[in-house]
Amino acid sequence: MAIYNIVEVGDPVLRQKANPVKNINSSIHKLLKNMADTMYDAKGVGLAAPQIGISKRVVVVDIGEGLLELINPRIIKASGQETDTEGCLSIPGTLGQVPRASKIQVQALNRNGEQVEYHVKGFMARAVQHELDHLDGILFIDKAESLRKQFEDVVLENKAKAKG
């Protein structure tokens, strides 16, 4: 199990278009495993390779329904729209109201190099779109209708320390 450092806003890799994966091999399998371990360790629901400083079109997502691994993903159909709160492991402490398609159809390669297609909606659609944006150098703050700092966690930590 390897946990990568998550790069934060300001790192140039987050603003670059990630490179397509040409060959799915043991190094890509290791990357997928380590990205999942990193995402779970950080208590995130998604992670794109650029967020760990690697310019490859690789994404992992798990909203609590099982791990989704996407290599060279692309959205082929989107419909509906909903606005909801998003945060990002690469932009700690910031939340924003972001409009996204409510349903998407995404094509990608799986870890075996097979083309897969998923029809997802709701929170899963939001998470996948957020991560795919990372592959094109787009951050949720670029699309947010409003932003706010996340103080709730700090308040809870301070209350816990005061009691301790």
Image: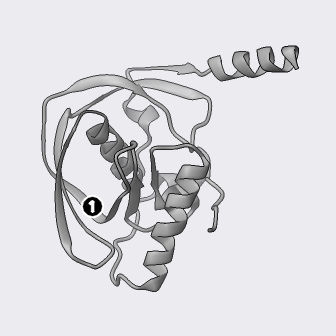
Q: Nearer the viewer, residue 138 or 52?
A: 52
Q: Could you tell me residue 73's position as x and y percent? A: 27, 61
Q: How is the image coloured?
A: one colour
At a point 45% along the width and 24% down the height, the residue shown is 96
Residue holding disc 1: 73
At a point 64% along the width and 62% down the height, the residue shown is 3
139 relative to 128 in the view: left or right = right
Indicate whether 164 appears above or below 58. Answer: above
At a point 35% along the width and 81% down the height, the residue shown is 24
Q: Could you tell me residue 129's position as x and y percent? A: 30, 44
Q: How many marks?
A: 1
Q: Is residue 83 visible?
A: yes
The quadrant of the picture occupied by the N terminus is bottom right
Q: Could you tell me residue 67's position as x and y percent? A: 38, 56
Quarter assignment of residue 113? bottom left
Q: Nearer the viewer, residue 134 or 12?
A: 134
Indicate whether 18 appears above or below 23. Answer: above
Residue type marked 1: Pro
Neighbour class for label 1 at 10 Å: few (<14), some, many (≥20)? Answer: many
Q: Nearer the viewer, residue 162 or 126?
A: 162
